[in-house]
Amino acid sequence: MTRYPYNARPPMGLPLMQTMVGRIIAINVVVLLLQGVSPAIDYYFALTPQLVVQRLYVWQVVSYMFLHGGFMHLFFNMLMLWIFGPTIEAVWGSRQFLRYYLICGVGGAVAMMLLSYHSRVVGASGAIMGLYLAYAMMFPDSRIYLYFLFPVKAKYLIMGLAVLQLVNGLSGPSGIAYFAHLGGMATGLFFFRAQVLNWFRFRTGARRRWDHYKRERNEQESRREQDNVDSILDKISDKGVRNLSSTEKRILENYRRRHGGDDEQ
């Protein structure tokens, strides 16, 4: 899942309904219409952790992500799917895209079951957050216009979103499934674990290389300073202190100050 061309772009001119993104959007729209016709759909297919555990309604960990709490809830989730989904699908292909989308949604459901057992959840937000994460990992320096106005690099946006979801989730009940969002992102991160490990290895290796460079630079500066001081001391032995230039006296004084007069032997 982590091998992809960074210059990939969605196929131009392909009708939306011929893509997996378009099919997912269509399914969500149809399901919302069915929700308006039959309220029982919410009971059986929304994620209710107690029903999953006590009555084994295990299908709810998947079905909940195709239900929504109203038109605006559906609209914003599908808008984000339409914005980010085609690029990711073009890179991975429809089958891998669907697999990733569903697994991120299931990850969101698991997070809600563990952290908010008495909740009831609908919506594709967990899966959508997984797509945010995937886009940021694949195109970290791509600019996303926050509120369609402010350009932000994808890698910074996903970090900000993660922190915001965590803070809001820990703030108490709010009617928004923040832990499902975090669960979707965390599940998505699992798919990119090799990339994350490589990043940490690079950072660690870069730090080691920088520390090594600093040590070598300090050692070179110390050797140069010692050579200068030795040369000045030899001059003192041959010609006396009075023949030192002002620069040589300053070098010697600085050396004495740093080394506590060790050169006065």
Image (spheres, rainbow, N blue to C red):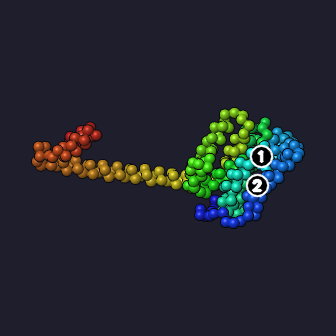
In this rendered view, identify the residue nearer to me: 103 or 209: 103
Location of the N terminus (image quadrant):
bottom right
- Look at the image and tell me in which quarter the C terminus lies: top left
Q: In this rendering, is residue 57 above or below 83? A: above
Q: What residue is disc 2 on?
A: 25
Front disc: 1 or 2: 1
- Which residue is at 72% across, 44% downward? 180
Badge 2 marks a residue whose secondary structure is helix
For the question of whether residue 262 can be seen, the reply is no
The answer to whether one can see residue 132 in this image is: yes
Question: Residue at horizontal 76%, vertical 61%?
Answer: 17
Q: Which residue was labeled with disc 1?
A: 71
Residue at x-position 71% and y-position 48%? 76
Nearest the eye: 44 or 246: 44
Q: Position of residue 227 (x, y in %)?
A: 24, 51
**Gap between marks 1 and 2 measured at Cα:** 13 Å
* Front residue (pair 241, 178): 178
